[in-house]
Image: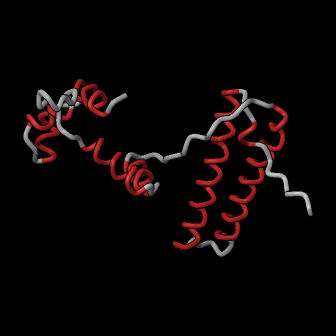
Amino acid sequence: MKSYEILREVFQTTSAKQIAADLDLSLSLIYKWAETPNEQLGTGAPNPLDRVDQIIQSTKDPRIIHWLCQRAGGFFIKNPKTHNAHPDHLIPATNEILQEFADLLSVVAAAAADNHIDAAESKKIRRRWEELKTVTENFVACCEQGNFVPVAPKLPEAAH
């Protein structure tokens, strides 16, 4: 879906007039954001969604999208890359999730041992939690696709 299409749908349930007032922008500019861009006719206008996408593409820095998701009350998990299916990797993938969860619990237990969790410990817990969510999302996506190659265990290289 294009950004202007999303905004067009949002404007069906949210007042463009209120958005203009909240952002201290003209109502016509707000409506231009939802127009199909056409350079020849001079319609449409670069909208904030396109701008944020340009920043993300330019910087390749995931902190931007993480911040936006956090501001919206959620979190971002990158979609896994998919390959050909092979269900033999189901058990090792399940074990990986359990290991990630155990690692998270270990970090939480160590941090809480003194009945106080400081900022550094909080960051460590957050990092482990994000890793667990990523591994689990990868597993769930593979379940949905019947494709477990992406979650195959990494085997050590043979000694030469």
Q: How many marks?
A: 0
Horizontal side of 61 relative to 102 (left or right) equals left
Residue in the image at 67% along x and 27% along y = 145
Horizontal side of 76 relative to 86 (left or right) equals left
Image location (x, y in percent) of residue 63: 44, 57
Q: Nearer the viewer, residue 143 or 37?
A: 37
**Quarter containing the N terminus:** top left
Horizontal side of 116 relative to 154 (left or right) equals left
Q: Is residue 131 above or below residue 145?
A: below
Q: Residue 79's quadrant in the figure?
A: top right
Image location (x, y in percent) of residue 40: 14, 29
Residue in the image at 60% along x and 63% along y = 125
What kind of colouring is applied to the model shown? secondary structure
Horizontal side of 114 relative to 55 (left or right) equals right
Image location (x, y in percent) of residue 99: 77, 53
**Quarter containing the C terminus:** bottom right
Residue in the image at 81% along x and 31% along y = 87
Q: Is residue 59 above or below residue 38?
A: below
